[in-house]
Image (cartoon, rainbow, N blue to C red):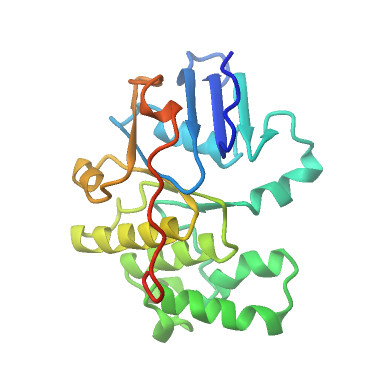
Amino acid sequence: MNTAIDGEIVQFDNVGLRYGTDREVLSDVSFTLFPGSFYFLTGASGAGKTSLLRLLYLAQRPSRGMIRMFGTDAITLPRDRLPGFRRRLGVVFQDFRLVQHLSAFDNVALPLRVAGVAEKDLAKAVADMLEWVGLAERSHARPAQLSGGEQQRVAIARAVIGRPELLVADEPTGNVDPEMAVKLLRLFEALNRLGTTVVVATHDVHLLKKVPDSLIMRLDKGRLSDPTGVLRYPPRPRAFPREGEV
């Protein structure tokens, strides 16, 4: 078993996952994610990317192996601690998963309301977040009134409104055009420069070169193609943004 590495935000050790009695969809997956780093997760359709992400955002428990997150055993975490633990995570889905009857403002405000933040305290935070993703003037629009790119930006704002330590994005550019895909990626970069660890799953190989300091995790039939490579060591620290830079 791998020795825990000081400062890791996530550590997988020989993780396997199967659904029911089917063959494993993930086998012997081991890697370490470090705070403030940017990772791409890539691989062919059916390679296991979504299953791996479900383990990362605690929607699924592994069939075997060890997962540590934020220095804690995530597999044996008591159920009553899960809500607080999940607040340290942000998740962005390809299909947005916005609440259709809520406005953009209310979709972004939802995590803060669930966490018990008072209305007087969340209004500015939500407005600032919508401005950050370029949707300040669309705050009252409902999802059906927004384009795919706008809906994805609302989903990103909702995912990061709580300042998560780890952001997981599952094919976030899959339903937008190439120009918007790059704009969304720049938002992830900006968040990463502020200290959030980012994991973006994508099948778009063109995006992999858009973040020079990123590390690439490649899945092939449920296995990492290079499980003992650079992912085992802290990457070069990313520069923090200058004042006013996003």
Q: Nearest the camera: 166 or 181?
A: 166
Q: Nearest the camera: 61 or 37?
A: 37
Viewport quadrant of the C terminus: bottom left
Question: Which quarter of the figure has residue 62?
Answer: top right
- Residue shown at 26% from the left, 47% from the top: 212
Q: Residue 219's x, y, as percent? A: 35, 26
Q: Nearest the camera: 94 or 196?
A: 196
- Residue shown at 50% from the left, 39% from the top: 34
Image label count: 0
Q: Is residue 216 above or below residue 127?
A: above
Q: Is residue 238 above or below residue 160?
A: above
Left or right of 207 on screen, residue 233: right
Viewport quadrant of the N terminus: top right
Q: Residue 220's x, y, as percent? A: 32, 22
Q: Residue 147's x, y, as percent? A: 32, 70
Q: Is residue 173 above or below residue 236?
A: below
Residue 17, visible in the rendered structure: no
Left or right of 132 on screen, residue 165: right
Q: Is residue 11 above or below residue 24?
A: below
Q: Residue 108's x, y, as percent? A: 54, 70
Residue 124, visible in the rendered structure: yes
Q: Nearest the camera: 46 or 186?
A: 186
